[in-house]
Image (cartoon, rainbow, N blue to C red):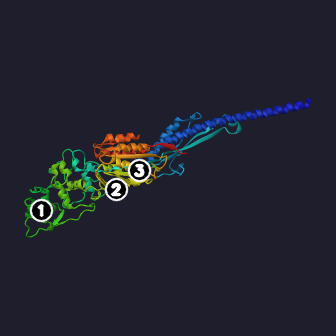
Amino acid sequence: MHASGTRRRGAVAVLVALAGTLIIAFAALAIDYSYLTSTDSELQRSADAAALAAASLLISRNTADESMVHAFSEAAALTLRNRAAQENVEMEFDDLVFGSYSIDASGRPTFIENFAGMPSAVRVNVRRSNLPLFFGGGLGHGEKTLGASAAAALAPRDIVVVIDLSGSMKYDSDLRFYHQTQVNARDIWASLDGPAPSRPYVPGPEHATEYADDLGPVIGAMAEWGTPVNPTDYDPTTDPGLWHLPRGADSTSTGARSSLLTRGFAPAVVDQLLSGANDGVGDQWRNRVAVITGLANWSVPANWDGIVRNGDIEWIALPPYRKNWQWRDYISWADGSGNKLINTHPQFKHRFGLKTYTDWLLDAKDHSSKTMLTHTPEEPVTAIKDAVQEFVRVTGDVDLMGLATFGSTGRHEISLTSNRQVVADTLYNRQANHWDNSTNIGGGMQIAINELTSERARQGVRKIMVVMSDGSNKRGPDARAVAADAAEEGITVYTVSVGYTVDRDLMQDIAEATGGREFYAFGDPDEYTEQLREIFRQIGGIRDVWLIE
């Protein structure tokens, strides 16, 4: 009994010793495991924060490279402020992977390691190297490296851009307003025979833009632009580029006389063409103006009695940008027929030249059914086109975009599409007064609401409307009531007000009703052009970010 008891006590002691060792080992492992788990959580929080910070800056700069550097700088700065196991978290530039993402039918996002244009997602890797273990060294594992990864992205949006295409969207090119702003009428004339303005077009004083050395098209015998149109001291009555050919009175225009003599007309014939003595006979005034300006060809009959008859002239060929008008319409317009320029500045009456010809197109033949002006830098619509192009550039690959326009009526132009460039391209093929002349902001907004609530709109995706106008609502539904409808549908509206005649109270009310914001661009074209591009960049950057892995 005694020997047996002694052996049992010895065996128990051995078991107790072994159990104690195991208990201590498990305790050590539990401490290290808890330590590693805590550190891993700290790393994951750091990766999540860095990814979200980087994603928020993916479109913060003008180019993808600049935006990626900016995103890395912010993520790195944030990472340095985070600690894991009481030491700084590590991250290098290569630890950021820029890309895009896709969304499957269930709404689940997947990170994609490539992108077109601007990145819309980023994956961030962080680590904590050579992390010392408390007890792992005794088991042959004295240190460990831990890492964490997270991907964040710009949240997808469904966006409809609503653009004012009323007649006033070319007022800053119209001579009627030359006292108020630096009109770019010369650039309109120069671009009539191409090339179309650069994207973006940079406005400025005459002979300071891309058309500075462009001689522009000769219109009949009218080949000299004349005095630059300066807002402070331009005088049409002394402009050598304008020939004064009054009805019922003699013309003293030296430019017209010189042109006729150069074209081979005898001095006596020139005297009679510049005389208003026979203007009461038939179409004498219109016909002689047509001959003087070179809009019609005419051979002097041997027995000419001083009357230029309809059957004796042949109108020159019409230009390719013309759709529905005749040369005689320009002459009638210069006589004061529905002429807004003469109503504002009477001294332009009966003055013929490249300036008034260009203004006639803008004033009386600006509808898309009459003259193709989409390839000219009409202002402010050209500045808007370039701003929308900038907006397309800074939006993400997962954004869908559509286009609505309005004049007197609202028009559905482009349905929501992932091909956002088609929105800008379509707008570049529009002009002021493209469809109709007045302003129906509410009608354009209603088109956008219809699209953002259609079967093409995505569920659970933020809905955005961007409304631009330079005027006040004159037609269609109450824009404030339409804004209330947009708010009920969860649509946020950002408004862009342009120019001094815009109804900013209305535009502010529209935005505020939906939780959006009004932006304002003003000044001469060279001032508001960059303002508009910056505004659309800002709106493009107003978006949520979300973790996708």
Give the camera-side residue of 138 and 391. 391
Q: Is residue 60 visible?
A: no
Q: Earlier in the sequence, mark 1 or mark 3?
A: 1
According to the picture, the residue beneath numbered tag 2 turns out to be 429
Out of 216 and 73, give the one closest to the viewer.
216
Q: Label 1, on which residue?
A: 284
Q: Nearer the viewer, residue 383 or 253?
A: 383
Q: Is residue 455 above or below residue 509?
A: below
Residue 388 pos. (x, y %) = 37, 49
The mark lying in front, picked from 2 and 3, is 3
Q: Which residue is mark 3?
A: 450
The amino acid type of the residue labelled 3 equals Asn
Q: Quadrant of the N terminus?
A: top right
Image location (x, y in percent) of residue 382: 32, 51
Residue 389 position within the rendered picture, expressed as x and y whole percent measured from the top left: 38, 51
Residue 475: give its label.
none
Residue toward you, 301 or 462: 462
Closer to the chain start, of discs 2 and 1, is 1
User: Looking at the image, which residue is at 18% across and 45% down?
Assistant: 233
Name the side, left or right, on which 55 lies relative to 534.
Answer: right
Task: Tell me the kind of residue under disc 2.
Answer: Asn
Q: Nearer the viewer, mark 1 or mark 3?
A: 3
Crowd around label 3: few <14 · some 14–19 · many ≥20 (10 Å): few
- Callout 2: helix, strand or loop? loop
Whole-angstrom CA distance, mark 1 to mark 3, is 56 Å
Say which residue appears at 7% left-offset and 59% top-offset. Answer: 277
Give the farthest residue toward the top: 2
Q: CA distance from mark 2 to mark 1?
A: 40 Å
